[in-house]
Every structure is written in structure tokens, then in C-alpha cells.
Amino acid sequence: MIYLPTIADQTKVFMLSLGMGFILGILYDIFRIIRLIITDKPKAFILQDILYFVVCTLVSFLFLLSVNNGKVRSFELAGEILGWLVYYFSFGTVAIRFGNLVISAVKRFLKFVFRIFIRPITNIFSKITGFFKKIIKFFIKKLKFLLKFYTRV
């Protein structure tokens, strides 16, 4: 006997797929914020996009496996796409603005920390290395003199 889902079951699965699309939209914003933090190189964008699509495929497969016994129906995929679009054009715009504010605040904080803590340490190390460079130059000069002296003899 073939099981045909009722309209109520199909509606439940569609609503769940809308929620899954919404979650995939949140995941996209997480990837986008990580992209803004790490780099702005096109190769990294391509790699992150491929990784995002692989993760979305895996999550969608597991979702359909758990909700609908692995049966793929067009309304489920349409629900995921619609849920993603709803998130992207509503909460996604707010999330990316908030993400930009957080990223700029973190970058300013890290510049401040660098200026206060890291720069003095690098200055100390540069003075130490300058001192050792002078000592090495002195010994090289003495060695050259000794080599010239012993080659004359």
C-alpha cells in the first residue's frame, strides 16, 4: 500500500522547510561575516561559497531524510528557497549591518590593543636586534682585519 501524505502533512512539511530555509539564511550570514573578518580575496569567496553550498546540501538532505523519509518534493525545495529569501531580505539586512558594526568595533579594539601592548614590545625587540647587529658588525670588522693581517704574514 502506498502512503500518500495528506494536505495537513504536506503543509507541516512545507512550514518546516520554510524554517529550514530561514536557518540556512542565518548560516549564510555567518559565512558572510566570517568572510568580512578574514579576507576580501576572490579565491576565498569562491571557496567559502562552495563550502556553504556543500553544507546547505548536507543539511537539506538530512532535513528531508528526517522529515519526509528522504522523499524530495518540489514544494519542500520551494519552501527552503522561500524561507531563505524571507530571511535574506528582512532580517539579513539588519544582521549584516549589525555584523559590520561589530567587525569595525573589533578591528578598532585590536588596533588599540596593538598600539598599547604589541608596539612597545616590538620596539624593545628592534632595539635588542639593533644592538646585536652592531656587535656582529664589530666582530665581522675585526675578523676581516685579522684575516688581512694573517694573510700578509
Image (cartoon, helix red, strand yellow):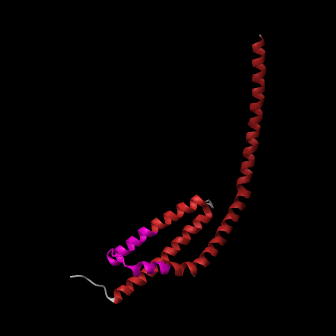
Q: In the figure, residue 112 lies in which quadrant?
A: bottom right
Tally of marks = 0
Location of the N terminus by quadrant is bottom left
Spot occupied by residue 39 in the image (x, y as percentages of width and height) = 62, 60
| Residue at 52% across, 74% down | 26
Find the magenta span and give its range. 56-83
Spot occupied by residue 8 in the image (x, y as percentages of width and height) = 35, 89
Give 63 or 80, whichever is nearer the viewer. 80
| Residue at 37% across, 75% down | 64
Q: Can residue 67 be found in the magenta stretch?
A: yes
Question: In this picture, is 131 found above or below 100?
Answer: above
Q: Residue lying furthest top in this view?
A: 153
Q: Report whether 17 appears left or right of 26.
A: left
Spot occupied by residue 69 in the image (x, y as percentages of width and height) = 31, 75
Location of the C terminus by quadrant is top right
Q: Can residue 101 be found in the magenta stretch?
A: no
Q: In the figure, residue 109 lies in which quadrant?
A: bottom right
Q: Residue lying furthest front in this view?
A: 74
Give 103 or 117, whichever is nearer the viewer. 103
Q: Residue lying furthest left in this view?
A: 1
Q: Report whether 101 appears left or right of 52.
A: right
